[in-house]
Amino acid sequence: MLRVRFAPSPTGFLHIGGARTYIFNWLFARQKQGTMVLRIDDTDVERNTEASRQSIFEGLRWLELPWDELYSQSERSALHREAAGAILAKGLAYRDFTPLGGQAEEGEKDRSGAPWLCNPGQREISREESDRRAAAGEPFVVRFRVPRETVAEVRFGDAVYGGQGRSTGDIEDFALARSDGAPTYHLASCADDADLRISHIIRGQDHLTNTFKHVLIFEALGVKPPEFAHLPLLLAPDGAKLSKRRHGQVVSVTAYREAGFLPHAFINFLSLLGWSPKDNREILTRQELIELFSLDNINRSNAVVSFQEGVADWPDPKAMHLNGQHLRALAIDDLLPYVEAELRAADLWTGPDPAWFRATVDLIRSRYTTLKDFSRRGVAYFSDRFEMEPTALERLNALGARQLVAELGERLAATEEFTEQSVEAQLRALAAERGVKAGVIINAARAALTGQSVGPSAFAVFRAVGRERAIARLQAAGC
Ligand code: GLU
C-alpha cells in the first residue's frame, strides 16, 4: 500500500515550494490509489506559531487536494521517546553527558578543519555508568552511534538524483534527543515515518544530505527505509533561493489566491516547476496531472520560477496565461462557485437568477484572466456602481454619440421585445435614420452599459445587462 506524507514545520507561511511538494505527493498518491498523510512537524516549540499552522491549513485547503490522514508530531512524543529508548537499548545510540555549551552542533568542524564527529570520551562510557548518571539526573543528549570501526558507506537510491552514498567517516554522531528529552527532527521524522508506514518520502532537495542519517535511523529501528524522491529547489530568475523578503508575494500561496487564481490553474503552474509530462503539454487538468505524473520525469536541475523582479509585474505572464486558460476551459458549473465567492468578497453578490448568472459568467469569461476580473472588469454586470474607463468615455463623447444612445434608450423603452435580434434591428434602424455608422452607436452603447470600450458582442451585452438596466444606462448617458 503506497503511503506518502507532507510534513511542514509550522514556522512560517505556506511557501510555494511547500505547496509543490504537497501537490507532487498528492498526485502520486491518487495515481497509485495510495494514502496522503499530512503531518505537522511541530516539535520546535520555540519556532512554531499558530498563525503559521493556520496558513498551512488555509493554503492546502484552497488547493482542493484533500489529505486522507492528519497528525501533529507534538502529540506523538511518547512514540519518539520510545524510539530513542529502543535505539539506545540496542547500543546503537549513547548518552552524551558533555556539559551544555561544550556540545558541538551538527556540521561543525573540529580544530583541524575536519568534520566534527563526536565529543571525546562519550562513546566509551559504559552502559552501567550511563544508566547510573542518567538516573542521578545528569543532563544528556542522546546521540546516534555512527559505526566507526570500519569505514562503510551509507547508501540509498533516490528516484530523482539516483544512487547516493556517503562514508560513515563523514557523518557525525548526530543527536536523536535533546537534553530536555525533546526529539530532534531526524528522530521524530523517522520514527513517525516508520510508524505511519510511509512508503515514499517525496520532499525538497535540501533534505537530500539528511537522508544518510535517516537511513541509519530506519535501520536502527529495524525497518526498511522508504523510497526517496527529492525535488529540485525553486529559484528566482537570478538564481537566488526564493525568499519572501526579496521576492514578495511570488512565494506565498495565499497571494495567488488573493490575486484571483483558480486552484486548478495554480496546481498546473506549480506542477510544471521541476516536472513536465513527456509530451510537453502545458495546460493540464487535475485529472490529467494524476494520470501523467511520474517521479521519473522530475528534473534534477533547479526549477526557475519565471517572474520579473518587482511586485508590479507579478503574477508572471506565464502563470496568468495558465489561469486564463483554466478559467475558460473549466465546465461552467464548476466555475460558478468561484465567481460567486469572488463577488461576495467584493460585496457585489445580490443573489441573481441562476440561469442569468450562468449565462453572464459564460459570456464574460472569454476575455478574463483571473477571478478578480469578474469583480473589477465585470462589475457593471453585477452592480450599477461602476466607473467609466477613459477609452469608454472617448467613445461616448464622440460627436453626437450621447444623444444617439439616449434615443436608442427611448426606443427600447417603447417596445416590449428585448432580444439580441430586436435590439440589433432597432439600433441599425436608428443608425440608418440618422445617417451614422452602426459602429458608432454600438461602441457608445457598450461604453454606456459597461463603462468599457472592449467586451463581448454588444448585443450579447444588452441581453446580459437586461432591459431595465440597459434603458436606464443609455438614458443616463444622454444627460
Ligand atoms: N518538517 C520538515 C520540513 O519542513 C520535514 C522535512 C521532511 O519532509 O522530512 O522541512
Image (tube, rainbow, N blue to C red):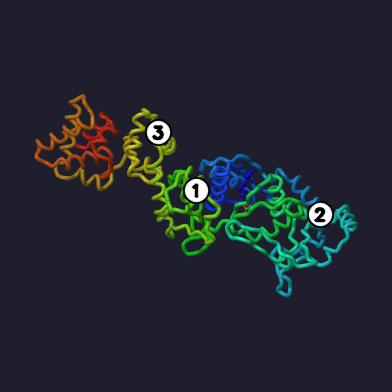
Mark 1: C-beta under 8 Å from nearest atom of ligand 1? no
Q: Secondary structure at mark 1?
A: helix
Rendered image: mark on residue 88 = 2
Figure quadrant of residue 229: bottom right
Figure quadrant of residue 366: top left
Give the Cα separation between the discs numbered 2 and 1.
44 Å
Residue appearing at x 48%, y 48% in the figure = 255
The residue at the far top in this view is: 416
Residue appearing at x 64%, y 58% in the figure = 157
Rendered image: mark on residue 349 = 3
Which of disc 2 and disc 3 is earlier in sequence?
2
Q: Which residue is mark 1?
A: 292
Q: Is residue 441 left or right of residue 169?
A: left
Which of disc 1 and disc 3 is earlier in sequence?
1
Q: Return the x and y of residue 54 as percentages of the image width and height.
A: 58, 43
Give the Cα separation between the discs numbered 3 and 1.
38 Å
Q: Is residue 207 above or below residue 196?
A: below
Mark 3: C-beta under 8 Å from nearest atom of ligand 1? no
Q: Is residue 350 above or below residue 105?
A: above
